[in-house]
Amino acid sequence: MSAELPESLTVELHEKEVAVLRLTRPRKRNALDDATVLGIEDFFARPPEGVRAVVLDAEGDHFCAGLDLSELGDRDVVAAMEHSRMWHRAFARLAEGRVPVVSVLKGAVVGGGLELASATHLRVAEDSTFYALPEGQHGLFVGGGGSVRVPRLIGAHRMTDMMLTGRVLDADEGHALGLSHYRTGPGAGLDRALELAHTVAGNSAITNVAVLQALPRIAEASPDQGFLMESLVAAVASSSPEAQERMREFLAGRGGRVRR
């Protein structure tokens, strides 16, 4: 990376190809201040060289309790809109980047914390995880991309319930609705996330980029446009030297087969 990260973020490499980016504000339940959000943007704009997957972890008992309300201040409409757009830009760097991101969820995944989690590509939730969108009770509205990303996971009607009533979902409820992909016991989330990240890092780079950047656009396109984009991406991926080498290995009996 070309710039130093704020004190609220640390990075460690795990066998070179996987990086662990960790939120380190446990006394604030890892609430997001501007420096942290900008640090996330900077990290994903320039991930460490050779890193092919990232685990997003958090120090302490909570993943992220959302926006640090002490920084909210008295913004006018324009400043408030620009602040929200800054979050959008930062989280888009994560969601639409070139490295898949696996998040480790525990404790509070609340407000902006849920917005951050929903921008990651795979989510591992420990037993302690709970989800909420309390902005409605504070006279606010989500501003970090939640109204776009969360309904795509659980449906607008369920997000409506969470925002209107302050409903809190536990780890099992959130998992059943699609807020997490994997469930683990207490303290087991990081190991599971690292296992997944190393699996993902073993994929061809072009396939991972296609899944991160092309798949969401194909899913949102009309069928005719989606089919055409799929054909183009499939052609690009299958013609890459890495894909052709992997297919030769598979046909020679040296590649792994799908098994239960």
Image (tube, rainbow, N blue to C red):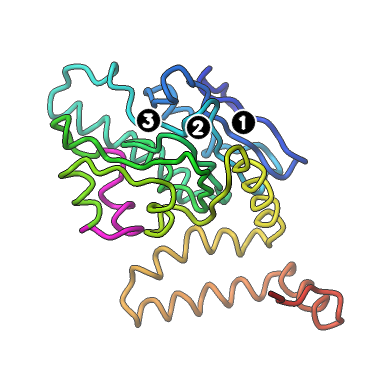
Residue that label 1 marks:
1
- Classify residue 73 as left or right of residue 9: left
Q: Earlier in the sequence, mark 1 or mark 3?
A: 1
- Classify residue 78 as left or right of residue 206: left
- Percent coordinates x, y for residue 17 in the rendering: 72, 45
For the point 23% across and 46% down, the residue is 162
Is 152 included in the stretch rendered in magenta?
Answer: yes
Describe the element under mark 3 as helix, strand or loop: loop
Q: Nearer the viewer, residue 69 or 247?
A: 69
* C-alpha span from label 2 to label 1: 8 Å
Q: Dot 3 surroundings within 10 Å: few (below 14), some, or many (20 or more)?
A: many
* C-alpha span from label 2 to label 3: 21 Å
Label ID, residue 56: none
- Percent coordinates x, y for residue 182 in the rendering: 54, 55
Describe the element under mark 2 as helix, strand or loop: helix
Residue that label 3 marks:
65
Q: Dividing the picture into quarters, in which one does residue 112 lie?
A: top left
* Residue range (magenta): 143-157
- Percent coordinates x, y for residue 64 in the rendering: 42, 32
Q: Dot 2 surroundings within 10 Å: few (below 14), some, or many (20 or more)?
A: some
- Classify residue 137 as left or right of residue 10: left
Residue 74 versus residue 81 in the image, above or below = above
Residue that label 2 marks:
42
Residue 236 versus residue 124 in the image, above or below = below
Q: Earlier in the sequence, mark 2 or mark 3?
A: 2
Q: Amino acid at mark 3?
A: Ala
Is 211 included in the stretch rendered in magenta?
Answer: no
Q: Nearer the viewer, residue 99 or 154?
A: 154
